[in-house]
Amino acid sequence: MNAESEQPQKGKRIAKVMARAGLCSRRDAERWIADGRVRVDGEVLSTPALTVTEANLVEVDCQALPGAAPVRLWRYHKPPGLLTSHADPQGRPTVFDRLPKALGRVISIGRLDLNSEGLLLLTNDGDLARRLELPETGWARRYRVRVHGIVDEKKLQGLENGITVSGVSYGPIRVELDNQQRANAWLMVSLNEGRNREIRKVMEHLGLEVNRLIRVAFGPFQLGNLTRGQTSEITGKVLKEQLSGSGGGGPRPKSKKTGWVKKSLKRRKKTTGGRPKKKP
């Protein structure tokens, strides 16, 4: 077996090639290699530290590895009560348990926690997932959030400078008060990083309890009218156009009130006559 250093530089890691073919994750590929299930050019592979090219014959369980599938991307309306995980030690239902089998093996771009709902992007390409998850991409995640408690709009405005909660520093968060109805309020929230349970933790720090959280957009991709559990593929043309742009869907300019902000203001105008509703 040739060592990795003897393979052409244009080659790709064996685990990545297996994952790209849609058989498994890279981690699973490494386990399969350790179990002796993978052959390269007729020899059982003993280490994942190998690069291969199209000239190599890769076999898994004595079957030739299929070619790499074209990159695909889907919108999915995640219902509450599902984990964004391929497996759960506690046996709780996951997103991937409920997806149509026709999608094949896919991974999520980012996550939504168990009780959150809304837009989740899915892809069959790990490199694309990692690219779109990076904060450097400049794509904002936007949410409709219902909280229990009386909202202090000055504190919400202060979140645009970032905040530290329990020793964890969070980047700028843009929040608009949609409406306050007695002890509950709807907020429109936009952020670029989206750390684990970030919105819930920050709102709790402000004395507000999140009782519903819906992601409505991830960069240029919108939840739209997808019903819970529904998937819709983003076509190759649209995907190419969006990825070739310069961060479309990133933070909205402060000088403009566009998109979801306009809708928020329209709803407020209907319920409060265009003025912020007075606190009780």
Image (spheres, rainbow, N blue to C red):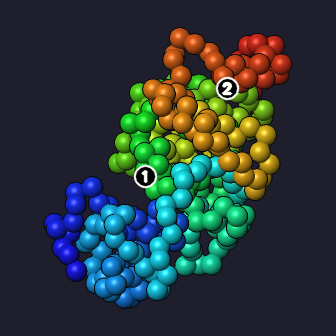
From what the image shows, is residue 265 above or below residue 25?
above
Query: x, y (%) of residue 245?
Result: 49, 28
Query: x, y (%) of residue 85?
Result: 56, 65
Secondary structure under tag 2 reads helix
Quadrant in the picture for residue 106: bottom right
Residue, x 70% and y 40% (percent of image)? 223
**Front label number (1 vs 2):** 1
Residue, x 45% and y 41% (percent of image)? 193
CA neighbours of label 2 inside 10 A, class few (<14), some (14 to 19), many (20+): some
Q: How many marks?
A: 2
On the question of residue 62 being in view, the answer is: yes
Q: Residue furthest left?
A: 5
Secondary structure under tag 1 reads helix
The CA distance from mark 1 to mark 2 is: 30 Å
User: Considering the image in quadrants, where does the C terminus appear?
Assistant: top right
Quadrant in the picture for residue 222: top right
Q: Nearer the viewer, residue 232 or 61?
A: 61
Residue, x 78% and y 23% (percent of image)? 267
Query: Disc 1 residue type?
Result: Asp
From what the image shows, is residue 91 above or below residue 212?
below
Query: Disc 2 residue type?
Result: Trp
- The circle on residue 72 is none
Q: Nearer the viewer, residue 230 or 214?
A: 230
On the question of residue 189 being in view, the answer is: no
Q: Nearer the viewer, residue 224 or 142?
A: 224
Q: Is residue 22 left or right of residue 43?
A: right
- The circle on residue 127 is 1
CA neighbours of label 1 inside 10 A, class few (<14), some (14 to 19), many (20+): few
- The circle on residue 260 is 2
Give the mark nearest the N terminus, 1 or 2.
1
Query: x, y (%) of residue 148?
Result: 69, 43
